[in-house]
């Protein structure tokens, strides 16, 4: 019961920060609120026993992506005091789209209710064993390097990161004299 | 499972209190006699010149980009560190390959002169 | 620490590993090139990249006929599969890369875009495409798709700070990220429904997945439809193709599209055959829309790159016909494979001619610039006319054979209405393809044509293959059939 309450509190916090991100006129404040929202998501991961995801969220999103966003704002001239409304001109249409997408997703998950982990349905999975959850990070690490698990995606990810880095430097770095 | 995280939760609650308390006590107890000089913006002891919101150089941005890449590398390596006792020599080769490929990225950045201070 | 010999057959992953590793190697070598040697280095990088592709090609051809996989997981399914389907597609990707290098060397030098990184990024992208065809796991499919796409986003922005190139890169990146989002969501829902990301495991579990599995499959389809530029997910294509440097456009019009179809086919046939009576009609509708919109909008394009962009949308529609008929026709997959092979040469050839006419970046790409090409350079004009006929689907060209097999598969699958749509839109497409021929032969104009040796040889090679595919399609179709059969057998074998 207490877990449910904490979960709801964190969810509300995340949503509130998300609302500030989209409604605030000041981009910089929006970026700070985005960091807080990321923190809320990390909290939700903790509540769902996904410790590794929570840590990745902290390190990558709050630690790195937010910095990147803030730098991007600082790089842009006159971004700080924009007078324009952050809302687009078709709130009705956007609202209908958002609500219908939510309705579809909610419908699908309602249809799958017998598979809900703690539900009463036939397909419901029992809550995972505590030892499995505690060992899950080490298990993931083992999978990353085992040839009978995810070693190939692991190495492909490194090549992908390499390509992304070359590309970002190539695009963002000023061209040298002989090329301009 | 939540009990494993209660220390974190404890810190999450405690950490904001640390800066908030001194500031709050100051607000409550400190005498306030504002004048023009005191209300000036303070930056390294001299008056500020121009707008305090300055435009950053693009170099900072690329540092941040490189940081993101290596942050992701760290996230990938973290669970392997947790499992290091169980994995064999083959894993070490895999990790070395992973790190070498990303070191190539660092070398590329270096070679392009991205890491030079400007 | 004991050393366990890993159970990996390194030869099977070698084609993709060689291409990616060669890219890393070139990058490392470049760091040690002094400033004085830069000029020579730029001269030899394209050749070195070709050597890498050739090594991978030899390895790939050697794997023809192999049927198996490696990185076997605990449950017995491999992470990557090497069968004729994968090998056939790998050959397409490697040929695409090689032809792109041949047509782009002079073009990049002429337009001042020559940077060694171009070739390295292209190698990374090709390795991603090859993994798309071999991946047997949704996680690997996603990583391969990103490895394919990220270099392409950057390459389409190659000509920055030209605004059209920047616009192209920006639009491609945003829409590409958007489509990746759909794909990841689809993978997540599929995993939620079946409890695995392994394609054979998904096949086994999909029947109990309920609406969650359906939603996952739908999102996967949307993600791939973005990648192959099927209507209504095609909005990015014209702007991206028009703004990107023409060599990059040529590369992605074939490579990215075939890569998308590679993963789409394998996922649909291996993982989702149980939902065949759902996705096949959906794809048929998608295909009809794509054919109609692509061909009709292409009619009014004065810019040849934009026209070819809409034409590439239309050709995605023809391939989709074959995919939609795959559950009901034994030749659906092989028709798609054959069509992609023929499309590779017709389209690459057409882009080679566009590059020869293009004076500077994105100048000389209007239809008016083709006036009187027959008098200025008869050989190129004849070749272009041949490619246009092939893209229209006039016999005896590879394009005709491709359409023939596609329509045959569609009729076998009882998709008569779709065949009729296909035939009618092919007739419509004749108007804008043959207008190029008319402009080249019947109107007068002047202007320089840059046709270096490498480009001429490429055009000649493309003409030759297109003609061979047109005159004697039978043996080639048999090869495509061998490539597809094993994919289908794996369905039966489970």
Image (cartoon, helix red, strand yellow):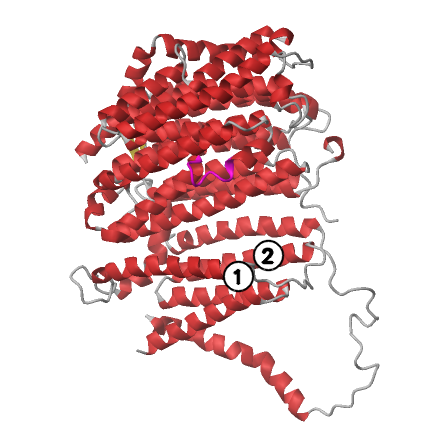
Q: What residue is pinned by disc 1?
A: A62
Q: What's the distance in space between the residues labelled 2 and 1, CA to CA?
A: 10 Å
Q: What residue is shown at x 31% (from left), y 62% (from top)? A: A133
Q: Residue C236 magenta-drawn?
A: yes
Q: What residue is shown at x 39% (from left), y 20% (from top)? A: C341
Q: Earlier in the sequence, mark 2 or mark 1?
A: 1
- C184, C178: nearer the viewer: C178
Relative to C7, residue C458 above or below: above
Q: Is residue C190 visible?
A: no
**Percent x, y for residue C479?**
30, 17
Q: Which residues are magenta?
A: C229-237
- Subunit bearing disc 2: A
User: Left or right of C459: which side holds C269?
Assistant: left
User: Left or right of C196: which side holds C434?
Assistant: right
- C196, C367: nearer the viewer: C367
Relative to C32, residue B104 above or below: below
Q: Quadrant of the N terminus of chain C?
A: top left
Q: What residue is shown at x 69% (from left), y 41% (from top)? A: B113
- Subunit bearing disc 1: A
**Quarter residue C261 falls in:** top left
**Percent x, y for residue C456?**
57, 11
Q: Is residue C280 visible?
A: yes
Element type at marker 2?
helix
């Amino acid at each position: 019961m207490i877990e449910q309450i904490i979960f709801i509190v964190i969810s509300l916090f995340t949503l509130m920060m998300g609302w500030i991100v989209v409604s605030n006129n000041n981009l910089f404040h929006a970026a700070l609120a985005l960091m807080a929202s990321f923190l809320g998501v990390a909290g939700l991961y903790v509540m769902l026993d996904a410790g590794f995801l929570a840590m990745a969220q902290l390190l990558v999103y709050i630690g790195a992506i937010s910095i990147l966003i803030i730098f991007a704002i600082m790089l842009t001239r006159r971004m700080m005091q924009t007078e324009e409304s952050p809302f687009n001109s078709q709130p009705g249409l956007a609202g209908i789209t958002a609500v219908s997408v939510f309705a579809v997703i909610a419908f699908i998950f309602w249809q799958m209710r017998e598979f809900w982990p703690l539900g009463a349905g036939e397909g419901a999975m029992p809550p995972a064993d505590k030892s499995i959850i505690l060992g899950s990070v080490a298990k993931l690490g083992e999978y990353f390097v085992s040839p009978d698990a995810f070693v190939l995606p692991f190495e492909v990810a490194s090549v992908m990161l390499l390509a992304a880095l070359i590309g970002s430097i190539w695009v963002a770095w000023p061209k040298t004299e002989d090329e301009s | 499972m939540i009990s494993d995280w209660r220390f974190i939760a404890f810190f999450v609650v405690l950490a904001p209190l640390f800066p908030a308390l001194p500031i709050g006590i100051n607000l409550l107890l400190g005498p306030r006699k504002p004048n023009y000089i005191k209300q000036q913006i303070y930056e390294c002891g001299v008056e500020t010149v121009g707008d305090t919101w300055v435009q950053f150089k693009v170099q900072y941005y690329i540092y941040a980009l490189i940081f993101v890449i290596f942050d992701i590398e760290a996230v990938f390596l973290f669970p392997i560190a947790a499992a290091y006792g169980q994995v064999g020599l083959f894993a070490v080769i895999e990790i070395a390959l992973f790190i070498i490929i990303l070191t190539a990225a660092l070398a590329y950045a270096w070679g392009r002169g991205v890491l030079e201070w400007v | 620490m004991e050393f366990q010999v890993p159970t990996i057959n390194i030869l099977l992953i070698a084609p993709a590993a060689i291409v990616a590793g060669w890219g890393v190697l070139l990058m490392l070598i470049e760091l040690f090139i002094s400033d004085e040697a830069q000029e020579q280095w730029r001269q030899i990088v394209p050749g070195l990249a070709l050597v890498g592709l050739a090594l991978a090609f030899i390895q790939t051809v050697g794997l023809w006929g192999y049927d198996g996989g490696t990185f076997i997981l605990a449950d017995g399914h491999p992470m990557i599969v090497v069968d004729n389907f994968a090998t056939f597609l790998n050959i397409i990707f490697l040929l695409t890369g090689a032809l792109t290098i041949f047509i782009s060397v002079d073009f990049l030098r002429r337009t001042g875009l020559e940077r060694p990184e171009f070739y390295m990024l292209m190698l990374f992208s090709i390795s991603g495409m090859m993994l798309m065809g071999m991946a047997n796991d949704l996680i690997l499919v996603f990583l391969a798709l990103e490895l394919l796409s990220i270099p392409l986003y950057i390459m389409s922005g190659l000509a920055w700070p030209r605004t059209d190139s920047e616009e192209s890169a920006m639009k491609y990146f945003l829409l590409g990220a958007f489509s990746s989002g759909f794909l990841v969501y689809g993978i997540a829902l599929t995993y939620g429904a079946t409890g695995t990301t392994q394609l054979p495991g998904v096949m086994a579990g999909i029947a109990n997945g309920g609406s969650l599995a359906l939603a996952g499959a739908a999102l996967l389809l949307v993600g791939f439809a973005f990648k192959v530029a099927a209507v209504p997910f095609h909005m990015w294509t014209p702007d991206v193709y028009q703004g990107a440097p023409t060599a990059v456009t040529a590369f992605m019009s074939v490579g990215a599209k075939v890569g998308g179809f590679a993963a789409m086919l394998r996922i649909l046939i291996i993982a989702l055959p149980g939902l065949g009576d759902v996705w096949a009609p959906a794809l048929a509708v998608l295909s009809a829309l794509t054919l109609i919109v692509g061909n009709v909008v292409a009619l009014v394009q004065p810019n040849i790159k934009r026209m070819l962009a809409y034409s590439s949308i239309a050709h995605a529609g023809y391939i989709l016909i074959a995919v939609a008929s795959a559950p009901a026709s034994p030749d659906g997959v092989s028709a798609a494979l054959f069509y992609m092979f023929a499309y590779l040469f017709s389209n690459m050839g057409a882009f080679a001619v566009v590059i020869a006419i293009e004076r500077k970046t994105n100048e000389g790409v209007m239809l008016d610039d083709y006036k009187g090409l027959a008098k200025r350079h008869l050989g190129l004009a004849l070749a272009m006319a041949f490619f246009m006929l092939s893209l229209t689907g006039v016999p005896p060209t590879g394009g005709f054979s491709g359409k023939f097999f596609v329509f045959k598969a569609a009729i076998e699958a009882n998709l008569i209405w779709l065949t009729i749509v296909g035939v009618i839109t092919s007739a419509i497409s004749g108007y804008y393809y043959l207008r190029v021929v008319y402009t080249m032969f019947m109107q007068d104009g002047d202007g320089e044509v840059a046709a270096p040796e490498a480009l001429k040889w490429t055009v000649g090679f493309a003409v030759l293959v297109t003609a061979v595919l047109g005159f004697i399609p039978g043996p080639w179709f048999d090869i495509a059939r061998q490539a597809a059969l094993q994919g289908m057998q794996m369905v039966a074998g489970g």
